[in-house]
Image (tube, rainbow, N blue to C red):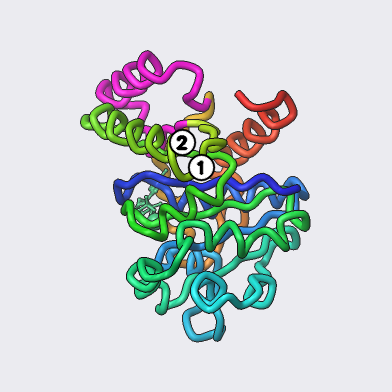
Amino acid sequence: MGKIIAISNQKGGVGKTTTAINLAAALAAAEMPTLLVDMDPQANATSGLGIRKGSFTRGIYHALILGEPLRNLIQGTDLEYLKVAPADRNLAGAEIELVEIEGREHNLRRALEPIRNEYEYIIIDCPPSLGQLNLNAMAAADAVIVPIQCEYFALEGVTDLWDTLVRIRRGLNPSLTIEGFLLTMFDERTNLANQVVSDLRDFLGAQVFKTIIPRNIRLAEAPSHGKPIILYDIKSRGAEGYLKLAREVMENDKKGAR
Ligand SMILES: Nc1ncnc2c1ncn2[C@@H]1O[C@H](COP(=O)(O)OP(=O)(O)O)[C@@H](O)[C@H]1O
Ligand SMILES: [Mg+2]
């Protein structure tokens, strides 16, 4: 049965979508059947994989709110083993519509259940909020990856996040595990970034991935070409980072949960 990993952090601009796209692509490149579920109404993961607005009629909204089989809206990508459940414009409204639905936090989990065994990994890109869409992702997930940008206030945000995770485990999803905290946009030339990394490692210990994602312009360029980094520039340091992350995720799964 596929492992469901949510990429979540209530803060925007920390590298969630970049991680969702490129980790999913790197897992697919290792011939792991992978599904990327775009739960952000901004649909950046969808467009970043070259799926244009208007090129499809059904998105994740239709599964979440209208109860259509998720299978019916899955799209292929340039990578044989990577599929996408795209986000469409309606998804912004789902945040409010879900509030009225009984058992609403579990709609995504229910939608994923019938297709789960067809994938090795299901990666969910979360919106930067703590609303119903994020809660649905956290309720559906087996594990969460929390990207953290290597910047001055990083540690402060982490304590808030920690509280959120504790609350979710007490209520919505007691079996949710932390796959890892992922340090992103690391610039090795600055003392600040090095200091942030060492503080976070002190604070979070072994829950921080060994892999650190470097700041790399190629990662920022790739989405406008509708490609994951491994198809846009396989030799870049960004591609190297996400291939390494995928290996670390697969290794950890072999060893059992951390
Ligand atoms: N490692 C990186 N190096 C350079 N730019 C990055 C990197 N990771 C993300 N970015 C860029 O930073 C911005 C925010 O990243 P994004 O993944 O969209 O964050 P989020 O989904 O958390 O809002 C985007 O413009 C993205 O292209
Ligand atoms: Mg995003």
- In contact (CB < 8 Å): disc 2 and disc 1: yes
- Residue pictured at 67% horizontal, 45% vertical: 3
State the quadrant of the C terminus.
Answer: top right
Kindly state the secondary structure of the residue where label 2 is placed. Answer: helix
Say above or below: 162 vs 142.
above
- The image quadrant of residue 101 is bottom left
- Residue 255 vs residue 138, the one in the foreground: 138
In the rendering, which numbered label is found on residue 169?
2
Q: Residues within 10 Å of mark 1 (few under 14, many from 20)?
A: some
In the rendering, which numbered label is found on residue 194?
none
- Residue 232 vs residue 169, the one in the foreground: 169
The image shows residue 254 at horizontal and vertical percentages of 74, 29
Q: Residues within 10 Å of mark 2 (few under 14, many from 20)?
A: some
Determine if residue 42 is in view: no
Say above or below: 117 vs 38.
above
Task: Give, as a single range, the part of the protein colored magenta.
Answer: 181-209
The amino acid on which the numbered mark 1 sits, given as a three-letter code, is Asn
